[in-house]
Amino acid sequence: MTESDDKAPLPRLVAEPWYVDRIEINDHRVAVSGWSMPPDPLTKPAQGWFLINGLPFDHTSYPLPRADVGEVFWQRQGAAMSGYECSIDNIEQIYPGGVLEIRRVNPRTPEIERGRDAWFIPDPASHTHTPDEDQRFRVIGNRDLRGFFISGATDYRRLDHVLQCLRGKRLHQFNRVLDWGVGCGRIARHFPKAYAASLVGCDIDHDNVEWCRSHLPGTYLPITATAPLPFPDSTFDLVYGVSVFTHFGEATQLRWLDELRRISMPGATLLMTIHGRTALDFGRLPREEYWRLCEQVNRKGILVSGANAQLDGHADHGGEYVNVYHSAAYIRDTWSRYFQVEHILPGYLLHQDLVVLRKR
Ligand SMILES: C[S@@+](CC[C@H](N)C(=O)[O-])C[C@H]1O[C@@H](n2cnc3c(N)ncnc32)[C@H](O)[C@@H]1O
């Protein structure tokens, strides 16, 4: 018997992922479908399990067969019965405040993690400027324009939710905000224009920085892959970096933790994403490989899983741009030498965990 034969499917995944993969809008009728890990057999799904702009749908079918999802999440019991289809016949305002919200009601989600239970679809009328396919590919690894808008709006609002819960203020209400590794502004484009004077974005991908400069409100700076950043000590009270620490080996990571500490004000909040257990859950890995990698990440704490060529020819990264997994225990032990590690929220931005830090 091999080591993996005794690993039975799990009753729950740490983040219980879900997704909206189709939205049809016809005048005031909206139909939505997707998948969400099937509910606890004791919690009967009902009308009101999914909400649109805070309202129940008129029709909800859940759970439905989704063999494709079952194949990806084979380690989760019942994942092949995760489909949902919902519709509402007459909704007055489709994009109140510029976004359409689809929410799943999951009573088990703690308040701070509730951002994970909503997806946001931005009003296309407010997003007429788009970076080209190659520019987008370098930040999300695919060319799907709809996904670029939905993931950006959703990530922005999920970060906003955490800040409201923990700090009692919105993302745009911080005085000096840094989007570290801004790319082509997938997230920064959702920062309210009226507050853009407080937003700075920086990246080693100078073509993408130039795109942000020409199309988005805020200040955007090209930087090099070696610290220091062009900011004085204690400049920012909020720094977020989405999918940046997912790409550094340990030595580079430690250098950047040190530099982020330097440019953060005492008491500043930092929101950084990592690839943890949920990224492995999404990995479409064969069983043996999945359990082997889980064990290796737990044992080593940080594991470089391979090279990443997405920036090649566009940014000088000196071969230091790779794909990395972290364990939560490693983050608590190692990152706490630089910051207070307040929370690690699994699968908070789809497959990425969110690490909430505070500068002491
Ligand atoms: C996966 S992309 C994510 C981009 C953006 N944060 C988003 O979520 O759409 C990673 C980004 O980090 C940038 N990057 C890599 N090394 C960096 C560094 N040392 N400092 C700042 N940005 C860096 C890359 O150029 C790329 O734009």
Image (tube, rainbow, N blue to C red):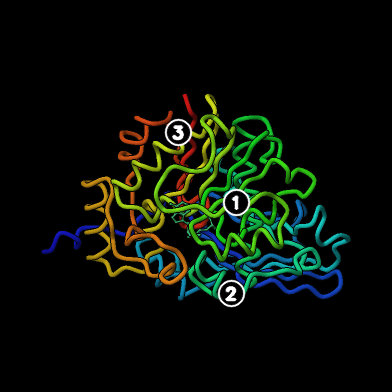
Tag 2 residue: 144
Mark 2 vs mark 1: in front: 2
SS at mark 2 in the image? loop
Label 2 crowding class (10 Å Cα cut-off): few <14, some 14-19, many 20+? Answer: few
SS at mark 1 in the image? helix
Mark 3 vs mark 1: in front: 3
Residue drawn at 82 percent across, 55 percent down: 96
| Left or right of 331 in this view: 269 | right
Tag 1 residue: 117
- Disc number placed over residue 5 in the picture, else none: none
Tag 3 residue: 261
Label 3 C-beta lies within 8 Å of the nearest ligand 1 atom: no
CA gap, disc 3 to disc 1? Answer: 31 Å
- Dot 2 or dot 1: first in sequence order is 1
User: Is residue 345 in view from this perspective?
Assistant: yes
Residue drawn at 39 percent across, 36 percent down: 258
**CB atoms of marks 3 and 2 within 8 Å:** no
User: In which quarter of the view is residue 35 placed?
Assistant: bottom right
